[in-house]
Amino acid sequence: MYVAQPIEWTEQGVVILDQRRLPAEEISHTYTDYQGVAKAIREMVIRGAPAIGVAAAMGVAIGVQKSAAKSIEELKAEFGVICETLAKTRPTAVDLFWALERMKQRFAELTKESADLARIRQALVTEAKEVHAEKKATDEAIGRFGAEYMPREGQVMTQCNAGALATAGIGTALGVIRVAYEQGRRIHVLVPETRPYLQGARLTAWELHRGGIPLTLITDNMVGHFLKTGKVGAIVTGADRIAANGDTANKIGTYQIAVLAKENNVPFYIAAPISTFDLSIASGEQIPIEERSAEEVTHIQGVRIAPDVPAARPAFDVTPSRYIAAIFTERGVAKAPYTESLRKLAGSVPAKAAN
Ligand code: MRU
């Protein structure tokens, strides 16, 4: 089955598929410096929490590889600037900070062991490639755990794009749907278009269509109608940050879907890697919510659709954990009370998902 490749480390640089141009065009850019990778994250060339993490790891690796530093001291100084630049790109997805932390730890280990700049450069490239490879394995495990919760047949709903484009693996929410479909479950996916940036219409519809998984695109304001009348068996979305109590930040619109799901007795699930947990914060109230440009609301693909008026533009919302039936991770399935189950999963060794 087709799996999109949003990012790749190559000899020439970091190759990123330009998601702003999908589905009309499949164009990739090769980034040869960390500033370029940071700009690509900020401007949504690459997006989706885990994929942003992979891009950040590769951004650090290319920054160190291309650094003109002649001594370990110079490299250390530049390393701080590289990490800071990448950290400032997008505030909500915690995978970004997880990946930067991992690269920082590796850098600290390496610089403690040796002052050989060539060796440090090479080892950081290896680490970034490992982050990428791990995301692939992680998604597959999430998919196997989550697929058990999908209906044998019928409709499922998602939100935004939590597919291969968003993770650099097979996807989290769409990974669950993909594995369930490959297991023979006769699933039909309802895809809300996900205004303002249309990740559902442009990216999820494209990925499912390319993968041969049946879908119907709906507008965001059809969600309630279909949850009431559409025989939806389950909803599964991704996450950008999960607080210690299970409150989950995800693309704007997720909260209203979760509330409508409860009202209509449809189970609402989150699929996300452990790297999306932020157990340092007690609840979703502490999750920073990114505000993007008002133009993403007043315009669609550069065409103005509203007069020149103020437009609200939070990119994410927080779904309280009481609306979440379960959280699928690569180490198993968390259920309420989340304060206990998430902590346990975060500290556990990977469990084996059922095949
Ligand atoms: O603004 P985006 O497109 O980066 O937002 C993406 C989402 O909200 C996804 O659902 C989330 O990052 C999970 S991706 C597996």
Image (cartoon, rainbow, N blue to C red):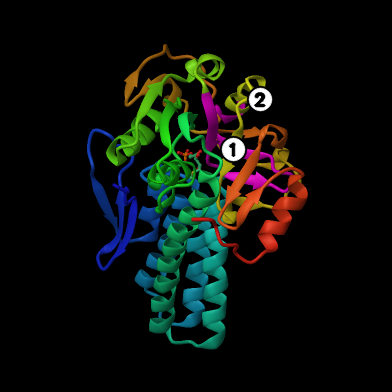
Residue 257 figure quarter:
top right
- In reply to whether residue 253 is colored magenta, the answer given is yes
- Relative image position of residue 144 (x, y in whole percent): 50, 51
SS category of the residue bearing label 1: strand
> Which quadrant of the figure has residue 219?
top left
Kind of residue at disc 2: Lys
Tell me: 248 left or right of 282.
left
Is 318 covered by the magenta stretch? no
Asked whether the viewer can see residue 197, the reply is no
The answer to whether residue 86 is above or below residue 19 is: below
Crowding near the residue tagged with mark 2, few <14, some 14–19, many ≥20 C-alpha atoms within 10 Å: some
Ligand 1 contact, mark 2 (Cβ < 8 Å): no
Residue plotted at (32% across, 26% down):
301
Residue type at tag 1: Tyr
Dot placed on the residue nearer the N-terminal end, 1 or 2: 2
Of residue 106 and residue 136, the one placed in the foreground of this image is 136
Question: 144 or 240, which lies in front?
Answer: 144
Residue 101 visible in the displayed image: yes
Q: Secondary structure at mark 2?
A: helix
In this figure, which residue is indicated by the disc labeled 2?
Answer: 262
Please report the bounds of the magenta region as a residue range: 232-255
Say whether mark 1 is within 8 Å of ligand 1.
Answer: no
Residue occupying the point 45% across, 43% down:
180
Q: Report crowding for label 1: few under 14, some 14 to 19, many 20 or more residues within 10 A (C-alpha).
A: many
Percent of width and height locating residue 130: 44, 68
Q: Position of residue 276 (x, y in %)?
A: 59, 51
In the rendered image, the residue lying farthest to the top is: 307
Q: CA distance from mark 1 to mark 2?
A: 11 Å
Residue in the picture at 63% in, 67% down: 349
The numbered dot on residue 269 is 1
Q: Nearer the viewer, residue 113 or 6?
A: 6
